[in-house]
Image (cartoon, rainbow, N blue to C red):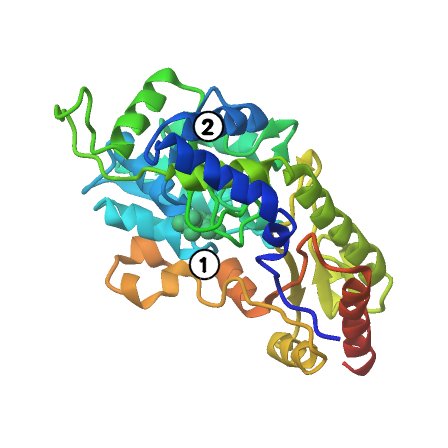
Amino acid sequence: MSVPLLDVNAQNHALKDELRSAFDRVLESGFFIGGPEIESLENEIAEFVGAKHAIGVSSGTDALVCSLMALGIGPGDEVLCPSFTFFATAGSIFRTGALPVFVDCDPVDFNICLDSARSKMTSRTKVIMPVHLFGQSCDMNAIVSFANEFGLAVIEDAAQAIGARYQGQGCGAIGDYGTYSFFPSKNLGGLGDGGMVVTNDDELAELARKMRNHGMAPRYYHQMVGGNFRLDAVQAALLRVKFTHYGDYTRGRQENAAYYLEKLSALDGVVLSDDAAAKDAKILLPVTRDGNEHIWNQFTLRVKSGQRDNFKQFLADRGVASEIYYPVPMHQQECFESLSEHSLGALPVTEMLSAEVISLPIYAELTPEQRDEVVAAVTDYIAQA
Ligand SMILES: *Cc1c(COP(=O)(O)O)cnc(C)c1O
């Protein structure tokens, strides 16, 4: 039996009629840019995550760029972000002309490490951009108090964490801005690119709305230079269909994660990564921090003793797909090679994780048989390792 990492179209096939009628609604209305579908999606997302304002944008990447531009970030400024993340986090900072300053992360929850952030503070630091990696919140109370101590703005990169909760609050709705992605492989995946910016601040909402549309207000008057970061009405209408099923998608992922944790933790040499026995284990399981609701964009193991790539090959030979998120951390990317030592300085936990992590299929539509096949493959690996 083969188990893909993700079946990106499984959800859409089940919703063909609803998706087609959403498309027809837009076709009949003639509103292709802006209009009621965008506003409805914005209201639905704002309510869901507990933010006062939501601004639909063209992608998760543009949500970050738009937020940074709205805060006036540019040349001479520094932005703290984790090195262990998807490229868009760092790329969006760099594209504003600001310096991305790469920070180490926590080996248990994979999220930004504030001791490392503190060591990289300068008088030019303006923003901290935590990433809720793999669908689990960062420690937002600690991040907000760190930001307040130094007068920094907080942009939460919640591309992988829409609907994840931190002490009951929605990820993305805690900092000055939060950003989401509707890339098809994200937990709320569209039929193309899309994203959202959220904020609780009226002025920041107004700024992001202007930035999304060339900094224009009123029409043909520009007090600032923005971009075209708009979300298509067709995409918003399709996303609204997906969104009505989002609770099921999240529950499916959470049930799969709970199943893996139960079955895999019973194996010899497999423990949670915060377990006292972790240093002698072969495989470490992901941990959900107290107070977090994890939405499992990825289910990510750590394979110790340099065996990660062997493990990946073993799974592949069994027909079980897996992926390395992420094999090369941002501070080691070629495109950032010429940045200063202050930005790139060694990040030992990040480097260790890049060599150890591997993500298993976790998507909601996995069948019980596929899930068991994944467990059986890991079980057989452990037996021969
Ligand atoms: C996917 C992702 C993005 C970018 O989202 P796009 O919609 O693909 O532009 C940004 N940050 C993180 C952490 C992501 O995983």
| Cα–Cα gap, marks 2 and 1 | 38 Å
Image quadrant where one finds the N terminus: bottom right
Residue occupying image coordinates x 31% and y 28%: 208
**With respect to residue 310, does 129 lie above or below?**
above
Is residue 306 or residue 263 the one in the foreground?
263
Whether 296 is drawn above or below 323: the answer is: above
Crowdedness of circle 2 by 10 Å Cα count: few (<14), some, many (20+)? many
Residue at 77% of width from left, 78% of height from top?
A: 381
In the rendering, at what x and y percent does residue 308 appear?
Answer: 62, 74
Dot 2 beta carbon under 8 Å from ligand 1 = no
Q: Is residue 89 visible?
A: yes
Amino acid beneath label 2:
Glu
| Residue 174: percent from left, percent from top | 51, 27
Which quarter of the figure is the C terminus placed in? bottom right
- Looking at the image, which residue is at 56% across and 63% down? 353
Name which of mark 2 and mark 1 comes first in the sequence. 2
Q: Report x, y in % for residue 167.
A: 65, 29
Q: Secondary structure at mark 2?
A: helix
Q: Is residue 96 left or right of residue 201?
A: left
Residue 149 lies, with reference to residue 159, above or below; the image says above
Q: Nearer the viewer, residue 151 or 160?
A: 160
Residue 306 lies in quadrant: bottom right
Can you identify the residue that label 2 sits on?
Answer: 42
Picture residue at 53% right of the left edge, 48% below the top: 189
Q: Which residue is under mark 1?
A: 347
